[in-house]
Image: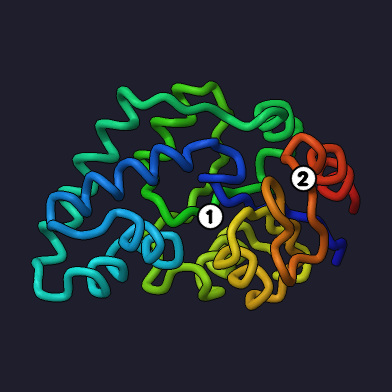
């Protein structure tokens, strides 16, 4: 059997520059519950929304918490100011359509809305927060993406910007490269920007 290389991308902070948007939304969400925005945002960076709610507002109805977050994030998709990182559009357009996917802690409809607004090409597969029972840093999201692509974990390259995502990819037995910002401990390689990593990603994806 011929081995093929697959690329699995995180979205926010990796392909999409939406960090300030996320920070603003979580601060607004926290304010509705009388909580400190920085503390809530710190938890949200490490967990899926349902896990964040269980940590910061354990006595509140998680469905109501999620409904408010969805309201804030959907509004941001329509009106927020954000964009793709330099080189993202060219990188994604240069990958074989059946060899890459998005693995995100966000929700698919929101990712699609942002990609459409910024002109980024969409893959055939998006593994989002609703698709898994365990989010990053669990290996479950990346393992699910590999399974749906028909790929072996060892043939997958994960592109991430956050510690939880790096740990998720490593736990799944995949090669992990970190991009943007400071180097993530544990990643096999680090690039200061997505644009710097792009030619190396394309080269790896083209290898049999």
Q: Nearer the viewer, residue 26 or 117?
A: 26
| Number of other residues with Cα within 10 Å of mark 2, as a class: few under 14, some 14 to 19, many 20 or more | few
Q: Secondary structure at mark 1?
A: strand
Q: Are marks 2 and 1 in contact (CB under 8 Å)?
A: no
- Nearer to us of marks 2 and 1 is 2
Whether residue 33 sits left or right of residue 6 in the image: it is: left
Q: Residue at x 59, y 58 (%)?
A: 162
Q: Residue at x 31, y 32 (%)?
A: 76
* Sequence-first tag of 2 and 1: 1
**What colour scheme has been applied to the protein in the rendered image?**
rainbow
Image coords of residue 128 (percent x, y)? 42, 55
Whether residue 23 sits left or right of residue 148 in the image: it is: left
Image coords of residue 179 (percent x, y)? 71, 49
Q: Residue at x 59, y 49 (%)?
A: 101
Q: Which residue is mark 2?
A: 192
Image coords of residue 192 (percent x, y)? 77, 45
Whether residue 138 sits left or right of residue 198 in the image: it is: left
Quadrant containing the N terminus in the rendered view: bottom right
Whether residue 83 sits left or right of residue 106 in the image: it is: right
Tally the marks.
2
Instruction: Tell me the tag on residue 42.
Output: none
Image coords of residue 112 (percent x, y)? 42, 35
Specify the quadrant of the image occupied by residue 143. bottom right
Q: Which residue is mark 1?
A: 103
Q: Nearer the viewer, residue 113 or 66?
A: 66
Q: Secondary structure at mark 2?
A: loop
Q: Nearer the viewer, residue 107 or 55?
A: 55
Location of residue 199 with respect to 9 vertically, above or below: above
């Amino acid at each position: 059997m011929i081995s093929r290389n697959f690329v699995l991308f995180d979205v926010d902070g990796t392909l999409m520059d939406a960090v300030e948007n996320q920070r603003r939304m979580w601060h607004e969400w926290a304010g509705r519950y009388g909580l400190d925005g920085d503390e809530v945002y710190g938890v949200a960076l490490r967990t899926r929304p349902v896990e964040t709610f269980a940590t910061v507002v354990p006595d509140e109805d998680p469905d109501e918490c999620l409904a408010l977050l969805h309201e804030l994030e959907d509004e941001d998709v329509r009106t927020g100011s954000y964009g793709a990182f330099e080189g993202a559009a060219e990188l994604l357009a240069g990958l074989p359509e059946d060899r890459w996917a998005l693995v995100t802690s966000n929700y698919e409809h929101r990712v699609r809305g942002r990609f459409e607004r910024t002109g980024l090409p969409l893959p055939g597969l998006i593994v989002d927060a609703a698709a898994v029972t365990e989010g990053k840093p669990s290996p479950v999201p990346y393992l699910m993406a590999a399974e749906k692509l028909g790929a072996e974990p060892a043939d997958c390259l994960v592109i991430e910007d956050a510690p939880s995502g790096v740990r998720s990819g490593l736990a799944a037995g995949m090669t992990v490269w970190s991009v943007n910002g400071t180097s993530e401990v544990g990643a096999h390689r680090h690039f200061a920007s997505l644009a710097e990593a792009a030619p190396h990603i394309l080269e790896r994806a083209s290898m049999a």
